[in-house]
Amino acid sequence: MLKNYHITVSDFTRLWFYFKLSIRRSLNLLSFGFYYLLDSIILFRPAPVKLKGTAIIKLDAIGDYILFRNLITLLSRNKKELYFIIPPGLKSLYAALDCIDDQKLIMLDSRKFNNEVLYRLKKLGQIRELGLETTIVASNSRMTMLEDAIVRCSVSPTRIAPEDTGNNMPMLLSLITKRWYSHIIRPAPEGIFEYYRNAEFIKEITGSKVNPSLKINLDNTHLDYFVIYPGAGRPYRMWSPENFREVAQWLIDQKHLRGIVLGAKTDFVLGELIVSGSPKKIQNLCGKISLIESIKTTSRARLIVCNESGPAHIGAALGVNTICISNGNHYGRFHPYPKELNKPITHIYPKALNEELEEKGEKYVINRYKHISTLKINTVSVECVLSQIEKIL
């Protein structure tokens, strides 16, 4: 009885997700006309006489950036003058890790862009005035009102993007916006790890062979501390702070390590819940140090424990032992890491997902969880996490 009830609840949650997705697509369709007319104002601005340079539009989250940044070198070999249209929060990473000049970084806040008319028009005008020869959308989940709108208002004769995956826009909009590009590149099949999808995309643009390289070069002299990242994009992807606290206490008592909790300002409360048991041996630095300082701190850790979010990819790229707790969301695309990349990252999933892998195979699991997982992340036990840590330390 309980098993059947669990399946019913899971299926209802899945249906609710797809219902919300259909509503979002419908709203996109309804708002398309308004934004199309609004953005058309920018098209009346005269284009610069001489076109030059290439812009990479990369407005995803930090994890997407980590799985893309090692490919920037290939682009820079083929494109002499590169600009990057990126979220403001990632500016320090492009500057520090990729040595991109501030003048080549164009900050664009996606939320403000979609909600504030004057900000939107200002940014579209700024990009148009650059007189770009080529514009490339480097996102596998582009959006009509964001990346596509930027490309439409640019003056670039060469406009490149991966084919729409169908996640963010209805088919009608996909057919319309497809005409705004000079080149649409077919993406790698679903279930292919995101770094490889990005590599195939860049290979199509540059014609150069891509040697798999997913790394961040920072000082990795490991010191006697561990790092916990308790945050994630959605609550259903977040292991409880009580569980993290138990793991932290065990690492302090059994492995005699100090602890640091890292994350954004919004994670501070979670950090306080984690450090409450041992305030002298673990620090809550959520929101207290910059993003680049957090990454430098992470590079010297003995161990990272986190949810399936940006920090998991940071840990893997740094070569730091990483334990990632996941409910299986986007299985195949962002996790688990392919063995050939040889990264010290271990993903721990709910028992139900592991059973499905054994009984029905990886193809079934990829197809079932490629968009959303309704499995409860807190069914991953503390004991299971500790047993994996024991194998590493």
Image (cartoon, helix red, strand yellow):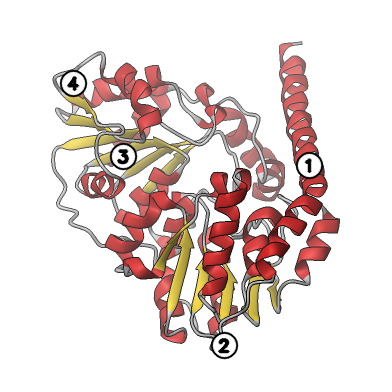
Q: Residues within 10 Å of mark 3 (few under 14, many from 20)?
A: many
Q: From the image, state whether disc 4 or disc 2 is nearer to you.
A: 2
Which residue is drawn at the image coordinates 71% and 18% (left, top)? 6
Distance (Cα) linking label 2 and label 1: 38 Å
Residue at the spot of label 1? 27
Q: Could you say which is closer to the camera, residue 32 or residue 192? A: 32
Q: Which residue is mark 2?
A: 49
- In the depicted structure, whether residue 57 falls above or below residue 304: below
Pick whichever of labels 1 and 3 is earlier in the sequence. 1
Mark 2 belongs to which amino acid? Val
User: Where residue 178 sits: x, y (%)?
Assistant: 77, 68
Q: Residue lying farthest top?
A: 1
| For marks 4 and 2 on the same chain, the one whose residue lies earlier in the sequence | 2
Q: Disc 4 versus disc 1: distance between alpha carbons?
A: 52 Å
Whole-number angstrom distance, CA of label 4 to CA of label 2: 68 Å
Label drawn at residue 304 = 3
Q: Are marks 2 and 1 in contact (CB under 8 Å)?
A: no
For the residues bearing labels 4 and 2, Cβ distance under 8 angstroms:
no
The secondary structure type at the circle numbered 2 is: loop
Q: Quadrant of residue 103?
A: bottom left
In the rendered structure, the answer to whether residue 374 lies left or right of residue 176 reads: left
Return the mark for residue 253. 4
- What is the quadrant of the C terminus in the image? top left
- Residue type pointed to by label 4: Asp
Residue 312, position in %: x, y? Answer: 40, 45
